Image: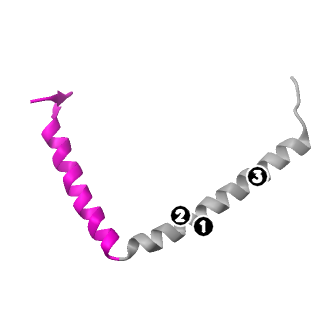
Amino acid sequence: MISFGNKSLLYYAVILAISSVILGFLGLGGLAGAFSQIASILFYVFILLFILSLIAYLVRGIKIK
């Protein structure tokens, strides 16, 4: 059996199977829609913060030490 350190590949396969079942139930339960809306809002907020910090950096100018 293939092993990574002291864990076997079968251990990781079981963990991934259990997590996929749990995430499948969450997706079918309607939580995926709410999470996608939250992720979309956070994406635009972080893009806005990035643009604002880029503008602030360009306005201050580059200081050479």
Say which quadrant the N terminus sits in: top left
Asked which secondary structure carries label 2, the reply is helix
**Of pointers 3 and 2, the one earlier in the residue sequence:** 2
Residue indicated by mark 1: 41
Secondary structure character of the magenta stretch overall: helix
Q: Nearer the viewer, residue 61 or 26?
A: 26
Residue at the bottom extreme of this rendering: 30
Q: Could you tell me the amino acid type at mark 2?
A: Ala
Q: Gap in Å between the C-alphas at discs 3 and 2? A: 18 Å
Disc 3 packing (10 Å; few <14; some 14–19; many ≥20): few
- Quarter of the image where one finds residue 62: top right
63 in magenta: no
Residue indicated by mark 3: 51
Asked which secondary structure carries label 3, the reply is helix
Q: Could you tell me the amino acid type at mark 1?
A: Ile
Q: Gap in Å between the C-alphas at discs 3 and 1? A: 16 Å
**Which residues are the magenta region?**
1-29
**Of pointers 3 and 1, the one earlier in the residue sequence:** 1
Asked if marks 1 and 2 touch (Cβ < 8 Å), the reply is yes
Residue found at x 65% / y 62%:
44
